[in-house]
Amino acid sequence: MTPHRILHRCAIVAVVGLGLAACEDPAPPIPGYEPSFRVLTESQYRNTIADVFGAQIVVGGSFDPLVRTNGLLAVGATSAHVTPSGLEQFDRRARSIAAQVIDDTNRRILIPCTPASETAADDACATQFFSQVGRLLYRRAVTPDEVTIPVAVAHAAAKDLGSFYEGIAAGLHGMLVSPAFLFAIDVTEPDPAAAGKPRLDGFTKASRLSFFLWNSSPDEPLLAAAEKGELHDPKGLTRQVERMLASPKLEAGMRAFFNDMLAFDDFAKIEKDTIIYPAFSAAVAESAREQTLRTIIDVAIAGEGDYRDLFTTRKTVMNGPLGRIYQVPVERPDGGWMPYEFPETGPRAGIVSHVSFAALYSHPGRSSPTLRGRAIRESLLCQKVPDPPGDVDFSLFNDPNSPNKTARERLTAHSTVATCAGCHKLTDPIGLALEKIDGAGQMRTTENGAPIDTAGDLDGVPYADAAGLGRAMRDNPAAPSCLVNRMYSYASGQAPTKAERDYLAFLEKSFASDGYRIPRLLRKIALSDALFAVSDQPVRSAGVASSKDDKS
Amino acid sequence: MSILLPKPTTRRGALRGLLGGTAVAVSLPFLDSFLTDNGKALAATGAPLPLRFGTWYWGLGHTPGHAIVPKRQTSEGIEFLQECKPLERVREHLNFYGGFNMPLDGRSNYTHFTGWVASRTGTAPSGNNDIPAPTLDLLISDVIGNNTRFRTLDMTAAGIPRENYSARSTNSRAAAEASPMSLYARVFGSEFVDPNKADFKPDARVMVRKSVLSAVGEQSKSLMTKISAADRVRLDEYFTSIRSLENQLDLQLQKPQPNLACSIPKSPAPDGDEQNMPQGLEVETVISNHRIMTQLAAMAVACNQTNVFNMVFSDNFSHMRMPGETYTHHLLTHEETVDKTLGYQPKAFWFNCRTMEAFATFVETFANIREGDGNLLDNTLIFAATETNYARVHSIDGVPIFTAGRAGGRVKTGLHVVGNGDPITRVGLTAMQAMGLSLDKWGTKSLQTSKTITEILA
Amino acid sequence: MLRFLTRHATWMGVAGLLAAAAMPSSARANSLGFVITIWNTAIYESKFIDECPAGFNVGYDEIWWRGLSKEDRAKYTDNGLKSRLDRYFNAIRRGPNGEDVCMYPTSVQDPPLLTVEGQQSYGVNLDGNVDGSPTEKTCKHENFVGLDGTPGVDNQIYRLLGCVYGFRSYGQFEVNANENRKSNGNGMTLIEVTGVDDPRNDPEVTVSFYRAIDQYTLDGSGAFLPFGSYRIDAPGGKPRYASSVKGRIDNGVLTTEPGDVNLPFYGNYTYMNQLIQDMRLKMELSEDGKSARGMVAGYYGVDQLMFYIGGLGPISSTAISNCPSIYVAAHELADGHPDPQTGKCTSLSSAFNFTAVAAYIIHPKTTADAAATGRN
């Protein structure tokens, strides 16, 4: 980075008035990654289809599972393959979307021209459609071939099937299974500012920004800015980033990030025993996930609050299904969300005390301090908890018929086995703090008739209950540092390597001086050179896959 | 490891043909990859019967001492104890493999994970997400799976699509079908062509679909530049998948080979009412979904829709549960007390028995479909394995494996094969060889083996 | 009180298993809230139906049938092919001029109603005496002995309806009405106890009754769930139902002083107001705070009762009931509220058993807010 560019960046920042009174230290440079490509995640695919064709288009079928990497599925997408069965699903989905686009209702809105005849090919109209759609689906200017091929396919199909619109569907089918749509591919060009070095081209930068902030494809203004080269210029980049941060799509983008960071995709397989937890239902599960995401957005994104307050905030939202679980009145039980504040003296405070965490990290018929503790360590503090050793006979100390009534008593028995003690010390004090919240997220005071003790400590900070655990987490330096790591990793699509350690430390420092405000962190990353850093040298990936396997 | 991969089909002019206004039906050599010396003939046409391969997965192993009576040397006659009693009724179709070990060369035993990865890939994983090599079903499908509508059909009765024990690598793992309805729609839905239907007319829409994919395939060249070697592999796999889909469409453009064994099943949802079909991990639901999916899988095979299939009955952390019971199957194996009189954990044992009952159903369903002068199972080899021997302590030596079926007459059945501590990869190697793979050794490090289990070969 | 034990077996189980968790509460401080889940006319049924020695009453259809010639039977029943339900509109219009006998119960003279002859009944001693002699407020009537041996129990509604098949536990009227409320959320009663300092013992509380506008919260198997929130039906911010009486709680048992109380009702296609005069309530709160069950006793107007019975319509075809017989007997058995002019009593002593689950009762915040929440 040249001094000239730094100066320029500072000037812009000051003009826009982002709360930075003075110029801060320059960010440490990072080497960048080799150009790569990411497979669109399920939510990116869905959002893109909704953005391009409208939310009325139904997207069905299953997607190949991604491997959670550095705690994020979005990073797994950078190494994901498309299996034959996954492609078969993409193909089926593409045909279904194409058929919906040309149906009687949608064709009027989505196809910009009327064919000369509905029963014959019309290359001019097809060209118009594929040029417009191709740009949005491929997230860049389309090459002449990329229009003429679908037009030719549409032409032949229209002839064979006797329908202009069937022809359009065939051409669109091809675009929707094309690698140019399914993969966000890094394209480089020579960097005019550094001879012999590559840089990402404007469209690639646009996609990276868009998937980072919106979890969707770039819109036309962003593509236009990319096409004009504005994203290579700090001023033009700032203009776009500010527009994106102000867009309502930011909320969807951040929901996707937190859904990923908190492994809330696991809600798809949550199951509770209806005899043990009759009040828990699919509506409760979906509401629980939604409640936590809404709380995060309200407090940390829309409210621009301190990220760490998410661990202590008593502010949340409530709806009918959740009212029954939390045992609180709901003003509109027939639907809708209302603001709610947990009682000042109660044990519920912070997102970790929400039904979402409690229910997701439990078994179908019982709570699990170990699963909860592990999830919090791994998802929120970015700490790795080793797997249990293979050869432990749990039944020696975990007999359901034993006099050990509470989870604490059962888990204390683990500490008699040296191989268990190490890891359980990491997970259990956290999980035990939440034991007054049962496997469905409901409050309780006893287990098997014995009173529950929730006291413990987090890395030396003592607490008495879940609210205290939240305060300890808020003040734990690992919490904001974890957020910074995940956010940067999510943006770059890579698990940070050693070479990025200084840069992450710089980001953490500035996150702290920005009052731990996420929108400022987003801006910082989006405007950074790091987000677009690219290398022509292979980088050894230090991606560590984390485990969400079910063990207790 | 050396495997003869079939030559990829070229997209020879299908698009150009179509653009020229005349559809060119691409003729493929009929079922060439499974023409073998031992192949049996279809009664109807005299054409050879295809070879089929399937896997059946169950989680959490056995209760040693209560499942199969151990033997000192390989011989005929498997002695089933209480936990495996349901298998009595399919004993003539089975082989049991006991006493095979899983040496890890110092790598950790990632509980409930290492076991299935090592036995299916021949390599011990180096992390609890690592799938270091392709699973054997995919290697087999590369050889026998190219000329059917689906290269493989992956299903799970355990409700979790990503728990599919078939993968090419860590990052190349398909989702398994978890819903009987979507499995039915995928195989027997509108795109299904009845092989026994008298008249056949190539569907113009299928031709259009093929031309679409052909055009997509043409884009490969422009994308192959400027990306890393690892990414090139990923792109290659994508284009291979495109070609594989084109091949499927080619097959749909030819008159299918009739098979009298094929009878099209009815939709599993009564009156198509998918909403009311049970879902979840309650054990009776799993069993019911497994039964429905088994019937669909067997018919998919009999109707020549696929030659390779993977069924997961319960996942590696078996989350199956009884209603009202706070402990799942997995938790029970660890936390239930061993009943001193019975000598086992009674509830965990109950789940294991239900599992073996389901396996018997699976085998029986294939055996009950007549094909040629025998049955569907005679032309199939099913590899049924789990990830642990005794789940209570996560032991991986002596992980039980069954095979079912005679692989078109290449495999003998009714045997109890004794491993004497040999690597467990011997079973997989032998299965792949029986499926026609030219493979002289398989596996890595201490799991590598070149020792075929000749005792089971006919 | 025992009647619901088998149908609601979990009630006992839950109370025993779970130590005092959160107490039920309405949205207001120091209050308890409940929504009534099951509401039944308290019909005591002995094992061998000793209370109805002559058996159950015949229904309107049998009476109509008896009065028809063989030819007419063939004519009106399509040669015997029409079911009782199909021929309802013929059968019910058996008045001399084709009157609907439920609308005009005096247009015919039917056989007298078979009434309860047993000694025992649910209910309480409403009039204070034990021999059934008339007072200023009551007419002469026979008394029952309570199931716990209490003498002087007044329950003429039981005497009236106890041998009508449709009102018994295996008949259809009560079951239908409960199912109706469960499935469509109409006529649901909320009970709010306010001024509660100690939910197990409090000598002075206020008990109020409202109508809810939100449907029941049910689990996947259709069982009632506690801790749902229910808005009060309050068009324009003014609760449509808002009766209130004084009460006390002793060892978790809530009892109220007598008072006139309006309760909402819906069942068998009838919406109505149930005015229960001189009403008193006894309700036992479960220890875990999730549920309650109890009994309401008081005087129920004859006209109010006949409005409901007269409107039961075709359901009576399988519930086996006959309006004119009930009409005559209801007036004969009436034991409360003598008409100042005629001296004839106009209401029936009555008792109703109910179960309830804990609920949050949502009061209208402002008039504007509530305008949108009224239910018709």
Image (tube, coloured by chain):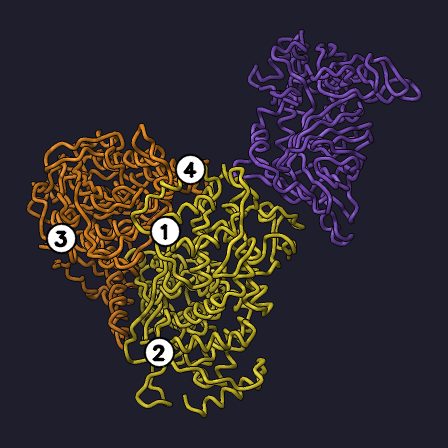
Vertical relation: C234 (above or below) C201: below
Q: Residue furthest top?
A: C54
Rendered position, C285 above or below C127: below
Q: Tell me if A320 is positioned left or right of A160 in this view.
A: right
N-term-proximal mark, 4 vs 1 = 4
Chain identifier, colour purple: C
Question: Residue A74 at what x, y percent from top left?
Answer: 40, 65
Relative image position of residue A193 (x, y in whole percent): 38, 90
- The amino acid sitting under disc 2 is Gly
Nearest-to-viewer mark from 4 and 3:
4
> Gap between marks 4 and 3, in whole Å?
55 Å
- Look at the numbered discs 1 and 3 and tell me whether their residues touch, using CB distance below 8 Å: no
Q: In 3D space, how far apart are the residues under numbered discs 1 and 3 (Cα atoms)?
A: 52 Å
User: Are discs 2 and 4 both within one chain?
Assistant: yes
Kindly indicate whether the residues beneath marks 1 and 3 are on one polypeptide chain: no
Q: Which one is earlier in the sequence, the residue at label 2 or at label 4?
A: 2
Q: Are marks 3 and 2 in contact (CB under 8 Å)?
A: no
**Mark nearer the viewer, 1 or 2:** 1
Query: Which residue is painted at 75% across and 52% down in the image?
Result: C365
Q: Which mark is residue A352?
A: none
Secondary structure category for the residue under label 1: helix
Q: Amino acid at mark 1?
A: Cys
Which residue, given by chain and number where applicable, does mark 1 sit on? A420
Task: Tell me if mark 3 has few (under 14), some (14-19) or many (20+) residues whose alpha carbon lies within 10 angstroms of its own.
Answer: some
Q: Nearer the viewer, residue B145 or A106?
A: B145
Q: Colour of chain B?
A: orange
Instruction: Quickly name the residue at label 2.
Output: A32
The structure residue drawn at horizontal position 20% and vertical position 40%, both measured from the top left corner, is: B402
User: Spatial distance from mark 2 to mark 4, Cα to Cα?
Assistant: 53 Å
> In this orientation, which residue lies closer to the viewer: B186 or B176?
B176
